Amino acid sequence: MKAISKLFNMYVSLVTCYPKTVLTVIAAITVALAVGLPNFKLDASADSLTLENDRDLDFFREVSKHYQSGDFLVVTYNPKVDLFSDQALNTLGQLKQDLLEIPGVAGANSILDVPLLYSPKRGLADIVKKPRTLLSPDVDRELAKQEFLTSPIYKDLILGPDGQTTAIQLNLAYDAKYIELVQERDGLRAKRNRGGLSEQEALRLEAVSAEFLDYRTKADARARDRVEQVRNVVAKYKDEAQIYVGGVSMIAADMIQFIKNDLVVFGTAVLLFMAITLAVIFRAKRFVVIPMISCVTAVVMMLGYVSWLDWRLTVISSNFVALLLIISLAIIIHLVVRYREYVDANPDWNRHQLVAATVKFMARPCFYTALTTIVAFASLVVSGIRPVIDFGWMMTIGLVVALILGFLILPSALMLMPKDKPSAAANSGEDHEPLTMIFSRIVENHGGVVLFGSVVVAVMSAWGISRLQVENRFVDYFHDSTEIYKGLSLIDQQLGGTTSLDIVVTYNPEEDRVELAVDDGFDGEGFDDGFESDSGFEDEGFDDFSDNSAKGSKDTFWLTVAGLKKITLLHDYLEMQPEIGKVNSLAILYQVGKDINGGLNDFELAVMQRKLPPEVAGVLINPYLYPAGDQTRISLRIHDTFPGLNRSELVERIKKHVDESPDFNADNVSFTGLLVLYNNMLQSLFSSQIVTLGAVFFAIMLMFVVLFRSLKIALVAIFPNILAAFSVLGAMGLIGLPLDMMTITVAAITVGIGVDDTIHYIHRFKEEVRVDGDYVAAMHRSHHSIGRAMYYTSIIIIFGFGIMVLSEFIPTIYFGLLTGLAMFSALMGALLLLPKLILMVKPFKLN
């Protein structure tokens, strides 16, 4: 304790005797860190949206490699004239050619290119000899239209039910180097997690990680440029058709742009609002300028720090800027309010005495508020999701920076200015009864109502939490007026769904002993799905148009009647699920064979595998068959806009069906796709946050015991914080707002913010009750003093974050509203429930 006291006295001497030196050093460090700001980057890659060590991600990439899935963009096309007229088709063809000229676009597929098998129906021999397309001279366009609308291959895939909406799939160049680097990096990471790496392997992991990060940065820049070029081409045709662009790389590009806009626009707006509010509250230039400088310095230092380290901000961690501004301001406001109280109470004190007394009184509560807030945000580090982990670390480091700067900049700056006069404090309106006194009178006169209301809130919160769902719908991240929303909605509703799910079935001859009998009486319908992306993170949709050629001529169980029958059973079940849109699998091959050939036997299937032209095989076989592994894939898409969609429940329902089916061995059936990866991420985040909340509260309560040296006080202090956190989660459940990768961090934020008010209030109450031993009078004095600082801070936070409702990015709006609600809940708990509990328990020993 003596060592700590000595260090603190050295700090007081530093800020009071050498303020210019302190500020000069801070300015120099800030400038040095700010030099790195041009390297500041945002990240919306696969690594930022999935679990860091998710085995399903490795399997996803393996499946993508086996089936030659590639990244692509989708351009929807709905002409103002009839789609099958010469004018519309010529325009579509020209649009396609213009898109093909964009660097990085390897191919394009549309209704102009896909093989026609039903217009009219042709025998196998004719199909093998010469596939036809919509542009073939002898094709009946009306028959072709009906084929696109009703055939098991193209229904709900290439032409919408309206007969007017179609799509061009732009196949992007396969990035082999990207895949090679990410696989090597992930392989070394997996080995490290299993049992450790040799020194050489550790060096290689460091090198390949750096190489991959650099390559991915360039690849992301190329992808954003490509999306921009596609949009520029599409813009030239807007007068002739309604056209939208969709795809994973477009979502990533738009998310980054929205985040950039919000960082600039709302960062500026929040700063402006903070300045105006400080001016209204304190009515003194010094107490506007100094807090703003401290807050901005903390943000610049942190942004510069992460830029120097090439630590990228993601959709989630970008929010740390706004939070850091607020927490920095909260520290400063508490210091300013206490300083002005000393000015009013001790007009004869000099600057040294005022500053020294302020920092000495506020150091302990501010240190513990920062420490407990760090514990709350540290709970994010165990999530296993890189952007959430980064968010936790950034807030942890940022809190330390904010605390240090608050206790350096304000005291040093005050030492360089003339002493504030008591009259200035009086003129600011602080001699009038503050609004917080209303709450103290409510506690004194209506304490029972406070307790009853708290019980009601607790019960409602518990009910709301029981209704919480974990969901993630990208379409809900954007306003319905944006192009990305319209494009995703159109694909979802007209072209078979958006989010992909793949079911991979492997044949095991030891377990799947099936009689190979001919059966021509079953059908299937669907065709590939999914939205895939070579950025290591593909989404399968429109996969039927993949350009991969046959994967060898190895005989496979799945191209037998028995194999196709098994697939069709599962295919038909999937098509009956209301949430599922387009389903594609080898079952369609048998259906087509039955339609055009009266059925297929094992011999004919074997011939088809070898003799079908690449155009037809690329649609019917290749996207769904991996002969080398005797493996087949059922690819389907989910309707994101389906009311009440619950992805986790859907996957479990399908798994249960597979488990209970006598035709499948569950050990040979695997699930992958974007739906699985996102669901894993959300479930992990949900469990890590909700489950660890108890551990977080326990750790904070231990800190309360250390701070207040009383278990009784610690228990009193923890209840309002638990209620505040649960009330926010409960409110989300009651209004039907799902937990996703953005909103689920609000629990930690609520704890972090709420704890600050609790510590400051109890610390002040403890001092006040020692004056006369009167708990009620001490409560009123605490509300009049520290309650005012809590109120000021809360108002700035609530309305500052309320500005975010103007954002174009829906998660930013939710983040702002929920953070405001969290602050309001914490303030009410600290001004109503906390003092009532203190009056009931009377935990302080009076000497």
Image: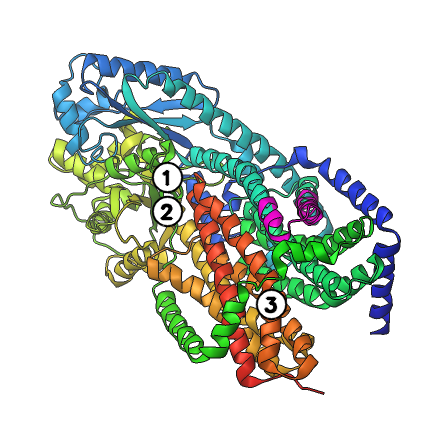
Q: How many marks?
A: 3
Magenta segment: 275-302
Q: Which residue is mark 2?
A: 473
Inspect the image, locate mark 3, and give the three-letter code of the amino acid beneath it: His
Query: Which image quadrant: the N terminus?
Result: bottom right
- Residue 748 horizontal/vertical position (percent): 53, 61
Inspect the image, locate mark 1, and give the three-letter code of the amino acid beneath it: His
Near mark 1 (Cα within 10 A), the count class, few <14, some 14-19 or many ≥20, is some
Q: Secondary structure at mark 3?
A: helix
Residue 67 shows in this picture? yes
Is residue 816 found left or right of 390 in the rendered image?
Answer: left
Q: What mark, if any, has residue 479 been given in the picture?
A: 1
- Residue 339 horizontal/vertical position (percent): 73, 60
Q: What mark, if any, has residue 710 been given in the picture?
A: none
Tell me if residue 125 comes above or below residue 688 in the rendering. Answer: above
Given residues 302 and 537, the one toward you in this image is 302
Tell me if residue 819 comes above or below residue 68 in the rendering. Answer: below
Is residue 434 found left or right of 528 in the rendered image?
Answer: right
Near mark 3 (Cα within 10 A), the count class, few <14, some 14-19 or many ≥20, is many
Inspect the image, locate mark 2, and give the three-letter code of the amino acid beneath it: Arg
Q: Which residue is mark 3?
A: 784
Reading the chain from its start, which is encountered first: label 3 or label 2?
2
Q: Is residue 290 magenta?
A: yes
Is residue 836 found left or right of 418 in the rendered image?
Answer: left
Q: Is residue 282 magenta?
A: yes
> Residue placed at 12% from the left, 21% from the top?
142
